[in-house]
Amino acid sequence: MGHRVEPDRWRAETDRLLALVAARFGRIETRRRAARFLVGLLAGLPRKNCWSIAEHAGEVDPHGMQYLLGRASWDTDGVRDDLRDYVTTNLGDTDAVLVVDETGDLKKGTCTVGVQRQYTGTAGRIENAQVAVYLTYAGVRGHAMIDRELYLPKSWTGDPDRCAEAGVPADIEFLTKPALATGMICRALNAGVPARWIAGDEVYGADPALRDELEIRRVGYVLAIGCDRRVPTAFGLIRADTLTASLPKRAWQRLSAGAGAKGERYYHWALVALVPAADSVLDPAGDDRKDADTQCRWLLVRRHRRTGELAFYRCYSPEPVPLRELVRVAGRRWTVEESFQAGKGLAGLDEHQVRRWTSWRRWTVFAMLAHALLAVIAANEHSARPASAGLIALTCIEIRRLLTLLIIEPSRVTACPHAWSTWRRRHQYRARTSHYHRQEAALGWP
């Protein structure tokens, strides 16, 4: 026999997560619907939205699920905090890395909160999209998203009426993506999240305010920068690629940035010592002698072993660390991409069809909860029941499939297919009639 899972263990873990957030829902009806919503996100539905989740939950129409996201009274930020505690309790370690990155969801129209034509890595070009910044917690046992903030462009924050129509609170102001990341990182650190390092791509590595905040807090970072960025050296500001060009052959070491699907990710790495930046809010001369002796800043350079392509990172640590440790942190940055893939592919993170501020925040926190549950179950399985010889460890994809087949589907109440067919057709009729009336009014027909 091959490796067999124990459904009761997974059902108990699901119940533990639901019990953790239960107090955030004041009414028992809301609490139960939230549980059904979370289960729906984990189910193997071809498309996840309020309609499909409500039908999967056995409800007669989507109004209850829509109400849960838009108008029901429950503590959205409290659930976010519970999610963070759940992840760090189950996946936490003192050498963990907080990884920041943004992702975009392609959208049509102009009414969905935060939407405008902007660059998104999801499409690799400028598209009509909604962009959000996410914070992932990456420990030895696994990784999961613990926070998110929606990026509101100036076309939104500069238009109070548009924001009010989408339910954006009046006190929300324009913030850059690095500023959103800084806020989430500070929120996590203030809550006592065990993390020693911060990692991010060039958008965040180029922001001096983020770097200064981390140095004030004495939290290490490995943040990517562009090749044309000037870094502070004892000889003044020098471009990263220019500084690298003068490195001798002996400066490079072959190290792995972590295990990949096809083996260890080996690159050549080099390290160059830097000095405190002249434009920093910190006063380099104001450090006491102990700080001056221990705080370290570097330029970390990664070179592809075959193509020679270079990547650059600005690094800081409140105390000396070996090159291997900085390489480890740089490698952890890719966990956020894995979190995006799992969150979207397994938990419907990008499949929401909501337009308003509160609904978006609630959908995303539910999707992150669903992904975190898969990550924790995977970590527990790897520790308690390692894979048998000839098998890879259980992945989140395989856990979601088995969770659906063994736990979710056998216990769910089937909705009446005729009732849902009638509801959909009635809704579509009303929508079509409304569109025709709007068109006739615009054309001035009697």
Image (tube, rainbow, N blue to C red):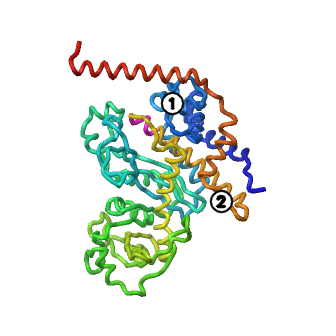
Q: Please give left or right for residue 373 compared with residue 389 in the image.
A: left
**Prevalent SS, magenta region:** helix
Residue ID at (45%, 62%): 198
Could you say whether the residue bearing mark 2 is in a helix, strand or loop? loop
Q: Quadrant of residue 296?
A: bottom left
Residue ID at (22%, 20%): 443
- Give me the disc on residue 393: 2
Residue ID at (26%, 66%): 279
Q: Is residue 193 above or below residue 272?
A: above
In this rendering, the count of numbered labels is: 2
Q: Quadrant of the C terminus?
A: top left
Residue ID at (63%, 50%): 399
Say which of 130 and 139 sits in front: 130
Q: Give x and y (percent) for residue 419.
A: 56, 21
Could you say whether the residue bearing mark 1 is in a helix, strand or loop? helix
Magenta stretch, residue numbers: 356-361
Say which of 106 and 9 sits in front: 106
Count neighbours of disc 2 (C-alpha within 10 A) and say few if under 14, some if 14 to 19, many if 20 or more: some
Q: Please give left or right for residue 335 compared with residue 395 in the image.
A: left
